[in-house]
Amino acid sequence: MTVIATADLCDAHPDVVRVCQTPFRSFGQVTTFHGPIRTLSVLDDNALIRQTLERPGQGAVLVVNGGGSLKRALVGDNLAKLAIDNGWAGIVVHGAVRDTAVINTMDIGVKAVGTIPLRADRDAIGEIDIPTAFGGVIFTPGDWLYTDEDGLIIAPHPLHV
């Protein structure tokens, strides 16, 4: 995947990009990724995340709005492996993850607010592919997400062509 700096995109497209203000931590061996957005809104429950990552990602980025909760981990090493196996570009979790020592050895990019060892519920409660908001931006399915060590930005269309 081509490395595209978020700072360069902000400079080149100041009237187009929206900058997420959430301070994410980075996990996995891929620190820079981009792709069209798919969204989930869940709270302490990751059954819909598993169901989504079991399907072909086709280079999309899964954005999971977990309400910023650090009560339960929404993504662990098994879900990160599913993302790799099914062609997802990366995962952004507005919430917690776990198994980070293993995820850090994997060829995937995962951004999350924090970590906790407790696994999520599995009740399949949540919303799929609807606009969701955190960090001062709205994540709309089909918009493009770019992330690197500097942060995360959203655009209504690809900026790297």
Image (tube, grey):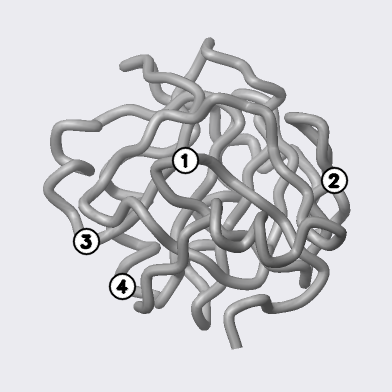
Q: CA distance from mark 2 to mark 1?
A: 19 Å
Q: Where does label 3 land, which residue?
A: 107
The mark that comes first in sequence, 3 or 2, is 3
Classify 10 Å Cα crowding around label 3: few (below 14), some (14-19), many (20 and above). Answer: some
Residue 150 bears which disc, if any?
1
Q: CA distance from mark 3 to mark 2?
A: 28 Å
> Residue 103 lies in what quarter of the image?
top left
Give the residue drawn at x 61%, y 31%: 94
> Residue 90 lies in what quarter of the image?
bottom left
Residue 138 bears which disc, if any?
2
Residue 150 position (above or below residue 80): above
Question: Residue 49's spot in the image, x, y percent?
Answer: 56, 50
Q: Amino acid at mark 1?
A: Asp
Question: Residue 23's spot in the image, x, y percent?
Answer: 54, 25
Residue 104 bears which disc, if any?
none
Secondary structure beneath label 4: helix
Classify 10 Å Cα crowding around label 4: few (below 14), some (14-19), many (20 and above). Answer: some
The mark that comes first in sequence, 1 or 4, is 4
Q: Amino acid at mark 4?
A: Asp
